[in-house]
Amino acid sequence: MAMILRWLIRIFTGLVLLAGLSIVAVYWFAARSLPDYDADFAVEGIEAPLEIVRDNSDVPHIFGASDADVFFGLGFAHAQDRLWQMTLLRRTAQGRLSEIFGARTARTDELMRRLDIYNLSVASVDAQSEQAQTALEAYSAGVNAWIRSVNEDARGRGAPEFFLFSPEIAPWQPADSIAIQKLFAFQLTSHLREEVLRARTSLLLDEGRVRDLLPDIPGPGIAALPDYAALLPGTEVAPVRQAAVAEDPLYPGLPGPLAGASNVWAAAPDRSASGGTLLANDPHMMLTAPSIWYLARLELASGGVIGGSIPGIPAIIVGRSERLGWGLTTSYLDDQDVHIERLNPDNPEEVLTPGGFEPLQTRSSILRIKDSDPITLTLRWSQNGPILPGSHFNLATITPRGHVASLSWTALDPADTSVTAAIELMGATDIAEAIEIGEDYVSPSQNLVLADGEEIALKTVGKFPRRRDGHQSRGRLPTPGWIVENRWDGRLPYAENPEFLEPAGGIVGNTNNKIIDRPFPRHVSYHWGDTQRVQRWRRLMQAREVHTRESFMEAQLDTVSFTARMLLPLVGADLWYTGEAAPEGTPERQRQQALSMLAAWNGEMNEHLPEPLIYAAWMRALQKRLIADELGPLAEEFTHLEPLFVERAFRDVDGAGIWCDVVQSARRETCSEMARLALDDALIWIGETYGTALESLRWGDAHEAVHAHPALGEIPFLSWLVNIRQSTSGGDNTLLRGLTKGTEPDPFVNVHGAGYRGIYDFADPDSSLFITSTGQSGHPLSRHYDDLGDLWRRGEYIPMTLDPELARAAAVGITRLRPTE
């Protein structure tokens, strides 16, 4: 017995030692890819020595003898800190994820191949300006210099992820940067999804009820739409129901509510306490670990530039120079149209055109899949654009038999010069020059807000498709692609893009709201991103005669929900302080307690309060009750509260109160009854999920910001290491926007928000501020992986300086690159 015990102790001790050695070995190999910021490198591709000075937040300040050398340094720095992220973005755009992830990403690769994003990017290289081509080539050389260093000096394969997935890294090419830009253009537009959703809804409801659920933004100029079925008479449309597809985290086709958003505003000198212009910007995108944003400062021949870059693209996308600041929001330009193409019954490789049946352009593409046989795809294009399979975006539900769907999209331009515009914007000296440069933007369309030392302006950039007057749906529904009136007729002149120069009130801004109302076909959009945040923004901007850096900061971090303040008095009008006092422990007593708490609440979506959770759960349950009986399974597509829909129903606008009646019941239910039943539903859900003690609830427990690692975030144990979770304030409709996931489980998890915040004061530029949502490094073992995230969560910022001496004084390391002899 003693011998057995001794052997058990020996075996246990051996296993513990083996486990310990394994952990040490894994850590050692993973840590090998942590870059040394104080190292010297001899590299090919630069003219003279250059320095990358990293300040104490790990922001690189890059100083070189020429602009080309500076872009080389940016590529080197991006690759040092974000090599895995860059290669993942490139593989996504190329449609080559399945080579390392296997069958799970074959659907993503198929979509990217059919859109042909990478080949269009290759074709676009020659269309760039000479300055942009020089920057792209120098940047690529910088990325490749770091890749060579990784290979030659055994630097842990460049990132720990390469130990789990294929370590092969192809040299970086200029087309790779353009492809990443196009990939984000795809994620920042939602009109394809909106058209399909509107079509599916119109197959179930009449036009008036569609207008309730997918409301037009208030204002003149919106015409009634035809029924979708009427656009394709005599055809049999596929059933509305389609099997749900569980999307992989790497799938780029985001749901409509998770498409692009942002806040940006600027104040002229006469509205600024400091006497200089002010600009604030916080672009909203999916929260990831690491963030898509990477802070950097470039010392170019035209002067210093600092702000947010995207790894893979050689530009400061949002930020400031010594003379100019610029910020972006998604414009919601209607830059996509879905067409239904009629196949030739005698030859399915032909589709009907205005001139008769014409052959599709076809090309084969081999999709290689790890641990599986390769798949040969046949890529098809009609005159209107690429043919997309019905398995994506629910296209099968609105495509009649004998037809296929195609996509017209401004980003499918083989001469896309958007990267040229981004690069040249950094050298602009004033607003007029910046607006002129904006003509090169193709996609994604953005509202570009500008501030120089004296003026402010907003200009919508991006190519506007020219539609014909006779377009059957005005771009709001899929239309027959063989009818010439439904086809695009080139682009509108850039001069017609909306612009606001030197606004009389001295304030200009956008929160994805409707910016202009022009008649079709010169319209911007019928589908806008937000109707709510702008109401709160306007109140905050008009509440002060002059603004400061601090007041702009307060507005960026404002958590008061205009939506809650508007809806609660309306929805609960017949419920407040009514009925007899209910006994303790009964559902009625809990309902009364919830209503009392909400009645005293000011609409602040603070993470420490219980009221935001009660409100959010109530509105979610209410919308579900209003639409479930009419829409059936399609109701699951409406994942987020549509405030204008609820308002229309409870105000009975154009008969919208009918939504409160349950179709299947004999009696007619009222909206007050629906409000009470929905509150009971919400309280039951809250009790099952978070407990029945309402006063102990915390919005932040439900509204955690989840910065998920796209590749490792769902792997047990590793997810604990690579994902970043934070209790956060804000909500779907607050200026401090934390858009919720909207689907079970955890529908209120914060997944989409301001990955970057910047505030620029041109009376004292070095007092400008910025922050990102995670940290500079993409390496989970680096202290810079999440160090900025704690500041971001607390609403804090770091200084934005173009003073070289200040950067050097706070340096955590200086990387020196010198030409090889």
Image (spheres, rainbow, N blue to C red):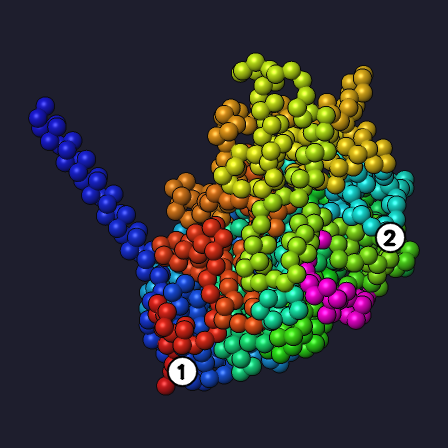
Give x and y (percent) for residue 6. 11, 31
Q: Which residue is drawn at 44% across and 72% down?
A: 61
Q: Alpha carbon of mark 1 to alpha carbon of mark 2: how far?
A: 59 Å
* Label 2 packing within 10 angstroms: few (<14), some (14-19), many (20+): few
Q: Which residue is drawn at 71% across and 31% down?
A: 571
**Element type at mark 2:** loop
Left or right: 269, with 650 as reference point = left
The amino acid type found where label 2 is placed reads: Gly
Q: Which residue is drawn at 55% across and 62% down?
A: 549
**Residue wearing tag 2:** 221
The label shown at residue 647 is none
Rendered image quadrant of residue 214: top right
Rendered image quadrant of residue 677: top right
> Are the residues flagged by discs 1 and 2 in contact, CB closer than 8 Å?
no
Q: Residue at x 87, y 45 (%)?
A: 225
Decide: is 267 above or below 338: below
Q: Does the magenta-highlighted stretch encompass residue 316?
A: no
* Label 1 packing within 10 angstroms: few (<14), some (14-19), many (20+): some
